[in-house]
Image (cartoon, helix red, strand yellow):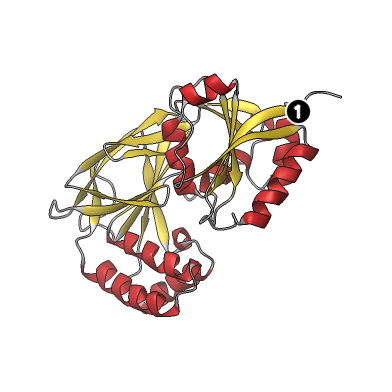
Amino acid sequence: MAQARALWLVHNDASGSNDREALERMSESCADCGLRVAFSTSFPTDDLPTPDMLDAAGLDLVAIFAGDGTVNAALGALSGWNGEVLVLPGGTMNLLYHRLFGDMELEEVLAQAGGGTLSARRPAVISSPLGIAYAGLLAGPGTSWNDVREAMRNTDVLAMATETREAFARTLQDEPLRCADPDLGRAEGYPLLLLEPREGAIDIYAYHAETTAEFIDQLMALAKHDFREGPHEKLGDEQAVTLSGVKDGDFGVLLDGEPSKAKGAMRFELSTCEVDLLAMPAANSSHTQRTDA
């Protein structure tokens, strides 16, 4: 029998589907697929593994079973490492996981990882002064809807009502965001812009909710835990783009779902991931990138 490949597991107990039972099932699935959890990190309680820690442990594989925010932090800590990273669906939306594996189920991904049939890639990402977005980023006053999504995830009815009211107000009243360089879309801007990396370009989408019907559509998207599916249009695809408030003010940003703030106009550029990510072989790839015209 072939020796199981040892890995370092990173997880987050607060992630969407990442409770104790899920972790136990995942560890059992690893064992069934020829993988062995040698070390485990519960982030943010524990420090994330670094290249030096992994090299000292003699490991060349890290599995991240957490939401997109934890995935982002872990990949940042592993930047420059010469091992491989397996991103698993341990959160609510699992955006990077679906980018790498399409609609593959967890068990199938683990089986292919154990069998050595996955491909190691360094996919395109988006770099900015705020950090790196591996799955994508949202910017503008519409990012306030993220607070509603968090309240829904925590089943906090009072907070959800409060955050929904505030999100409506901010979407309507706060300074819209525009693509300043290159000049794309309307000059009066949008409440929400989405940037998604793919090989060769950043896809740029504008989201809006300016009528009663569009607000209803936005609420339906929230009910599905994905406010990215609200009313939108594609503005273009570029190697880099500068986003700016129409009055050059500050604006909110969600990097892989994690909130941040841009202090005035900011440049976002296509770059390459600085660690190898395991993914389905290119010939079988079915990325979930949007194809809006």
Nearer to the camera, 254 or 171: 254
Residue 197 is left or right of residue 28, and the answer is left
Disc count in the image?
1
Spot occupied by residue 126 in the image (x, y as percentages of width and height)? 38, 36
Spot occupied by residue 263 in the image (x, y as percentages of width and height)? 18, 47
Task: Specify the quadrant that holds the N terminus.
Answer: top right
Which residue is under mark 1? 4
Residue 144 is left or right of residue 2, and the answer is left
Q: Residue at x 60, y 57 (%)?
A: 17
Looking at the picture, does residue 84 appear above or below residue 198? above
Say what secondary structure mark 1 lies in: loop
Amino acid found under the numbered disc labelled 1? Ala
Nearer to the camera, 251 or 246: 251
Looking at the picture, does residue 36 appear above or below residue 102? above
Q: Dot 1, crowdedness within 10 Å: few (<14), some or many (≥20)?
A: some
Spot occupied by residue 103 in the image (x, y as percentages of width and height)? 66, 48
Residue 256 is left or right of residue 20, and the answer is left
Q: Quick one: which residue is furthest to the left in this view?
A: 247
Say if residue 183 shows up in the picture: yes
Q: Residue at x 20, y 58 (%)?
A: 188
Q: Residue at x 71, y 27 (%)?
A: 5
- Res 92 → quadrant: bottom right
Spot occupied by residue 231 in the image (x, y as percentages of width and height)? 42, 64
- Res 59 → quadrant: top right
Q: Quick one: which residue is furthest to the right in this view?
A: 1
Nearer to the camera, 105 or 5: 5
